[in-house]
Structure formats: C-alpha cells, structure tokens
Amino acid sequence: MALTYVPPEPGSDPAPWDNSYAGAGTVTPGRVSITKPYWILFTSQVHGKAKSVLEIQPTLDPLTDITLIVGSGSEQPVPDDEYEHYFRVYAVPAGYTVAEGDELPPDEWMVGSQTGPLTARANWWNTSRTNSALWSLLVCAAVMFYIFLARKGASLFLRRIAGLDHVEEAIGRATEMGRPILYTCGLGYISDIATIASINILGQVARKVADYESRLMVPSRDPIVMAVCEEVIQEAYIDAGRPNSYNKDDVFFLTDDQFAYTAAVNGIMVRDKPATIILMGLFYAESLLLAETGASTGAIQIAGTDALAQLPFFITACDYTLIGEELYAASAYLSREPLLVGSLKGQDLAKMIFMILTFIGTVAIFFNLEFFQQLFQAF
Amino acid sequence: MEEKANWMEKVSKLDRRWIFIMVAVAVVIPIILGTSFPVNISPSVQSSYNYINSLPQGSTVMIVCDYDPASEAELYPMTLALFRHCFDKGLRVYSFTLWPNGAALIERAFDTMKMEYADNPLYPNGLQSGVNYVNFGYGVGGALVIIAAGQDMRTAFSTDYRGNATGSMPIMEGVATLSDIDYVIDLAAGSTIDWWVAYGVQRYHFTLGAGCTAVSATQYYPYLQTNQINGLIGGLKGAAEYEQLAGHPDRALAGMTAQSSVHALIIVLVVISNIFYFLTRKKGR
Amino acid sequence: MQLVKKHLPIAIAFIMGVLMFLQFYIPSKTSNDFLESVTQWDRIISAFALLLGIYSLLNYHYHKLRKRVEGWGFSVVIYVGFFAMLLSGLIGGIINPPPEPVLNSAGAIIGQVEVYRPFMWMYDFLFVPMQATMFSILAFYIASAAYRAFRARNKEATVLLITAIIVMLGRVPLGAFLISYKPFGGEVELLPWFTEWILNNPSMAAQRGIMIGIGLGVISTSLRIIFGIERTYMGGGGD
C-alpha cells in the first residue's frame, strides 16, 4: 500500500465539506494521497479518544489515485474550542469502524504522522454569509431612507389599490341597508405579519364605521388577536368622538380550531346577513368556504391575504382582492401616515433594485458571467 | 322565446345545490364501480422517491407530518406510502408534527405499519418504537422547534409521544442534530415548508423534500427549481404516484378515478356555464 | 405607566430584533447558546399561549351561558365536549393498548380487534371525521365557485379559463388517458407534460414575483416593528 501524507500548506483552501461553514473556523487542513482503496478513518483525537470520526469508503477503481483534502468538517461551532485537536489518517480493513469516544486504531495503521495540535476558534463573523448581510442591509437602508424622507415632509406617491378605494363605499352600503359589517383578521396569530397588517386596516375601517355609526362585528380565532382588536377598535371609536357607540360584545373570540372557526363565521354570515364582509389576513384552506358563503348571502366582499395558495379562491369569490403585499400596503394607503408611506416606498425601491439586478443577472447568465452569480451566493 | 330566455337564465344561474349533488354523484359512482386509471409519474415525485431509494439500509429519514385530520385525505396516504417505502428499505424513521392535532395520526400510521410489517424478514422482532422508528409527537413553538432540532435533537425532543425518554433510544445513535438526518421530508397542510427551508435547510444544511395539499403545490415550485427542496409530492395525485412507485397501491390510487371524474365534471360545468353566459348575453343585446 | 405600557415593550422589541439579526451572522459559541436559550424560552411562552386560548374559550362561553344569550345551548355543547376530551385523556390515557386477538372455537387466533381508549375513540370517530368533512366541503364549494365565476368575460379571463382546463385535466390520470400523444419523443403524455410546463414556467414566475413582494413587505413591516414605528401588536396604531 502506498500512502503518502502531505503536510498542510500555509494559506491552503478549506476542505470541500467545510464550505458550508467556511469562515467560521480557522483550522488548517492537510492533504493525503492514497493509491489503493481501503477504508480510511480520519479521526480528531481529543484526550486520546476518537472524536469527529470521518469514514471514507473506497468507491473508485483500485488503480485510481485519490487525493483527500481533510479538514475539521463541522457544521456547528466547535463546542470545545478550548481543546487542542490532533488529526490522524488511518487506513483500516474493510468493515472496521471507530465511533466517537472509542479508543483509536492501532498506530501501525496510521498513515503519515499526526498533525497538530490545532485549536479551533470560532470567528466573530461568518464570512460565507456576508452577501446575505449586505443585501439585507441594503433593503433596510432603502426602507429607512424613505422613512427619513417622509419625516422631512416629502410628498410620496402611491398608486390606486382598487379594493381599498371601495372600503368606504362598502361601509356606506352597509349603513344604508341597516346591516352589519363583518371583519375577520384571518387565522393567523399576532406574530404573523399579515395579522398585524390586517389589524392596521381594521383600525381604519373601525374609524369609518364609527363615523357612519354602523355595526362592526369582528370574530377572532386567537384570544391575543382579539384583545388587540378590542383596543384598536375602541381607540378608533374614541378618535371618532363616539366612545359610547363601541359595543364590546361585537368583538369576540370563537375558537382556535380552523374549521370550527370557519363554521361559526359561516353561521354568522348566514344568520346576520352582513352587507359587507372584509376578509384580511392569513388564511388557509377555509378561505373558499368563507368567501363562497359570503357570496351566497349577497354581501360585498373585500379580501386580502399573503397566502399564495388562497389568492385564487378570493379572486374568484370576492368582489375585490388585495394580492400579497397590497395587504401590507393597505395600512399606509388608508391612513396616509408619512412613516407608513415612507416604509412602503422603501419597499418599492428595494423591489426596483432587485428587478434591475434580475434583468442584469439574466443577461449575465446568458453570457456565462459567473462572477455576477457569486454576488448573490447566499451561503 | 321568453320561456327559452328564462330557461337559459336559470341554467346560467343554477342553484348551487344541484352542483353539490352532481359532485357527490361524480365522487361516489367511480368509488362504487372500482375502476382505475394508470398514473403517470411526475419528475418532482420521482425525485423524492429516487433519493429515498438510494439510501442504504440503516439510513435516517425524518417524515414530518405537519397536518391535522382536516388534510388527512390527501396527506395521510402520502405518509403511509413514505413509511412503507422506508420500512421496505430498512431505514430508520423519525416523525413529529408542528400541528397539535396531528400527533395521534402519526401514531395511528405507525400502528398500521407495525401490523403490516409484523412478519417482515427485515424485522425479526417486528417494528419497534425507539429501535426502528420514533414518534416525537407534537412540538410546541412552530419554527422554533426546527431551530431547536437543528441545535440538538435530544433537547428538542426529550420524550417521544408515549413519554419515553429519547436520549438512550437505539434509534438516536449517531443522530445529534438535523444535520445528521439523511433525508427530511415535510408533509405540510399549511406553510411549514417555508419554515423548513428558511430555518432548517439554510441553517443546518440537510436534504429536504416536501409533500403538500394540491392547492399549495404551485407555490413550492420555486423551491424545487432552486433545489432548496429536492422533491415535491403534491396532493392525492402525488400520493398515488408515490404509491405506484413504491409498489404499495392504496387509498390514493383508488381515489384517482373519483378525482378524475370530478375534474371532468367541473370542466363540463364551466363549459356549459360559459355557453349559457354567452347566449344570455347575446339575447340581452 | 407609560414606561411599562409603551417604552419598555418597544425597547424589548428593538433589542431582541437587533440581537436575533446579528445572531445569524455570528457563529461563536456564545451566539449559539443565546439562540438555544431564546428558542427554549419562546417555546415555553408558546405553550402558555395555548392555556390562554383555553381560558378565553371557557370564559367567553361562560358569559354566554350566564346571560342566556341566543344560542347558549351550543355553549353547553362546548363545555361538555371540552371536559369529556380532557377528562377521558387524563384519566383513561391517550395511547391505545395493543389489539386484542380474536379466537375461534378451537382457541386459535384468527384475527385481532382494536381496543380504544375513550379519548382515542372520540378522536378517531368524532374529531377526525368532522374535520375531514369540513375540508371535504371545499370540493363542492370549488365546483359551485367555478360554475359561478369562471366566465370568459375578457381576453385574460379566457386565457385563465383555458389554462385551468388544461391543468385540471393534466393533474389527473384522465388527461393522459384522453390524449396519449407524447411530445418530443418523451415518456409523458401531452396534457401532463403541458401542465408541468405551465407549473414550472409561467405559474412559477408569477408565484416568485409575488413571493419576492411579500418577502420585502415582511422585511419592511418587521423593520417598523423593530424600530417601534409599528405598535399594533401592543394595541396601538402606527406613529
């Protein structure tokens, strides 16, 4: 058997399987050349026992040379970085195995000499994720830039969103018909962004409902969302100068079970026959059940969700639908609060940058310019 | 002529209860007749199957059942098909759910497997919990469970569904984190696949497959194209394809005829509604 | 009071938001331990949110019962169902015992019969069918929605209609059965092949565009929450 061990070269590249964690440690690898297929056990010896055992099975033609580049090969930060690691390569008979914590194989099976001691140190920055950090900061900067502009009083344009333009008309319709407005924040929790966006819209809708002195029913699936909705609606009524018109019983918790909630809301639609139904937030499979039942009662329906799979059902069954990020834009659109509009414009700037980069990237790939792809290597 | 116009109007605005009856008939009759169609295999399902098929005996597969009884019709056959394939190959199967009502379904699936593989030569002592498979039950915290499992599985799942400590289980040998799992496949009724990609694959670098309801399947094709998931089993048809590949025909394949007849019915209804829509519109002019 | 109700939650949101952002990029042991700790605390808090849900449900229906509000009978059903499942699970357990063998007259085992705990019986024979039934209603609703709304009112609607028909046929074996021609000498029939093409190309492009928009919206809303501009989660509106 001919095995030669090549000591590590200064500044050599990290091991292939280290790429996923490149930049996270500073262990110097070594190289081993073998000319016969054996089971190769690579062990990192800590306190005389095997640790981080890597088995490499021979899978190539016996006459093929194999060059192994070995390294520390860890997906996690080295937990015991205060220990010194020694690296050995053993060529062992087929079927021989070493598990973590076992005694090391006999010394006569060792290939070359031991490397070490090497001490792993976690870096303070994972350089393989630098791309991701920079792009995240770019998006943040775009948003903060427009928020800054908005604070300075700049006038920022927002295009029309058809569904939101008809909210006031829908509330007016309900008032004329003497029937309530049903608003649901979806089936998400307060930690879901769509629910927060929905509650923002609810505040605006509640304000308009208070002005019209109509009735607003808000069945909730989550008690925390219900509590937040209560406060938002109460504030809206106070802002409208009609605190006594607020009816606490119209904001209620039903159940946290998906279809039990759906059945309950459908029952409310069929019995109370609201003139306007607003479905905003995170929805799952029940979206069509809600929208179709609402359509059957003759109510005008405005829906908005960021759940991609449910959008087709809302578009089919509802009069107006806010698609994806239009839901997030809705609170800025209705309130015209400078900071909200500013953050929306920042979003749009970031989207414009990504659109341009997508176009450039398509051209770059067409002409095989790989360096451009590297800029977007996530990690 | 008036009568004809009224009749066309009536058909155009048919009471939906008639449609419900037609759908019910379209589902029930094929099931009673027991007819079947061969199923063509889509590349996304083939990909998942091939990957599991390539794993050597003793490899680890985690099948996460992120659904509840509402989605049982589509995702439970998928679960059984995957379990059967894994146990045919002698793989170690780990399972849990992020949905509280789903844990009992997993246990039911494993109980079914225990009965089916009781006399299998690969398992002389039958399938044993803690040895050949483990059901960790419901994990509280959503995406946080994925992060916790990625850090340390024994901490994330200290006991199994039956309350037994997982730390000393033979099946946990050599498995410390999600990175040690050879294949993870998430069967999702909701949006948990997004969590698995964002918090699982990108952090802990394991191979992920996905299964989902038919309505959600289209939104996961971007992940498939970028290889963030290596396979996608969509809906009852996907489950039927997997059953056919694995050689265990069951509910999903049996349901294909009913699904085909309902799809055909909907197409016929849509065409009829459009014909009468144009006719009534022409009349109106 | 302002400090506790307003400033403190905003400060906590800011600090935790920034720390979790940085944690993703710092691979040190301290960073990892921090992530583990936060994850465990979050899971504990999530578990308590379940208790909050139970309290809210029972409290709401208690008030309905007390005031004899219309439909109070259903509140009784809630209480009966809740305590039946809870007590049967606590007392009787939630794991079924092994199946009992069925013996013939000679004493040989000819089969086995499932033995159910009350909790699992209610789960398997009440809860599961009810949930599955509600989801199955979708099939009927989709048919009625399609009949009502899939009209070729304009060019775009016509394209949508034709695409829907192709995909509906391609996603079931019927499509392959109807047209057996296999394009480009491949192994897949025309309709399934075309369906896969639609899902992998125009549909995916549209999905991806919407996903990018949603992703940016999530970043923007998250930034607003972290910097205290968005305070809806506290019960208040924006700044």
Image: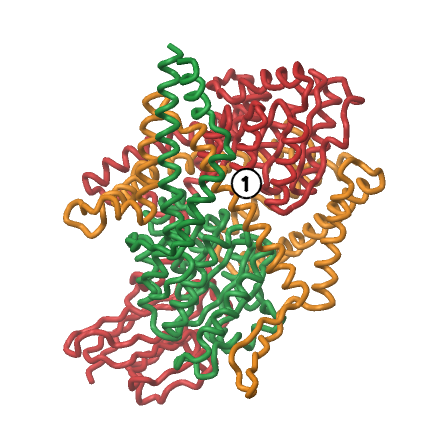
Task: Judge whether B98 appears above or below A323 on screen.
Answer: below
The answer to whether A211 appears left or right of A151 in the picture is: right
Q: Chain of mark 1?
A: A
Residue at 73 percent of width and 31 percent of height: A250
What residue occupies the far top of the structure in this picture? B285
What residue occupies the far right of the structure in this picture? C66
**Residue A166 in view:** yes
Give the residue number, with chain letter if any, for mark 1: A286
Q: Which chain is green?
A: B
Image spot of residue A153 (x, y percent): 55, 17
- Colour given to chain A in the rendered image: red
Residue A74, picture quadrant: bottom left
- Of B170 and C176, which appears nearest the observer? C176
- Of A111 and B137, which appears nearest the observer? B137
Element marked by disc 1: loop
Q: Amino acid at mark 1?
A: Glu
- Colour given to chain C in the rendered image: orange
- Of A115 and C6, which appears nearest the observer? C6
